[in-house]
Amino acid sequence: MLIIAIADDLPNHFSRIEEAIQWVQGDYSIFVQKGRPAIAISSQWFIENINSQKITHTSKYNIDIVGRNKLVGISNAFKYLIEKIKT
């Protein structure tokens, strides 16, 4: 199975994961520009506040503001993705 198909299937297995808009300013975009697949991890809050937020790339941008349960959920999704790629 192609990596893209596996990634596209993630929302079917993880309720809080969804595909969102792609923005050129994302850290991942350099990979895409060089023809490499990339997955950006973001939040609904960031997507809704992308133009007005004052956290990203500042001293306020730190691990203390990240929900631990969200990290576990993302880790589980990546584990699933890697296991599917290996098969």
Image: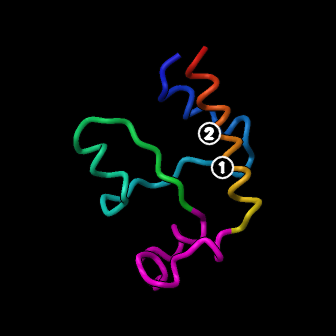
On the image, the x and y values in percent for residue 26 come to: 37, 60
Snapshot quadrant of residue 52: bottom left
Type of amino acid at the residue the image marks with label 2: Phe
Q: Which residue is mark 2?
A: 78
On the image, the x and y values in percent for residue 32 come to: 30, 43
Q: What residue sits 60% from the left and 65% below the top?
A: 44
On the image, the x and y values in percent for residue 68 come to: 74, 63
Does the residue at mark 2 contact the one at mark 1 (Cβ under 8 Å)?
Answer: yes
Task: Tell me, yes or no, whether the highlighted magenta stretch contains residue 44.
Answer: yes
Q: What residue sits 62% from the left and 22% below the top?
A: 84
38 sits left or right of 35 in the view: right
On the image, the x and y values in percent for residue 11 come to: 66, 40
> Mark 1 packing: few (<14 Cα in 10 Å), some, or many (20+)?
some
Q: Secondary structure at mark 2?
A: helix
85 shown above or below 36: above
Residue segment shown in magenta:
43-66
Q: Quadrant of the C terminus?
A: top right
The residue nearer to you, when weighing 26 against 58, is: 58
Q: Secondary structure at mark 1?
A: helix
Q: Which residue is mark 1?
A: 74
1 shown above or below 10: above
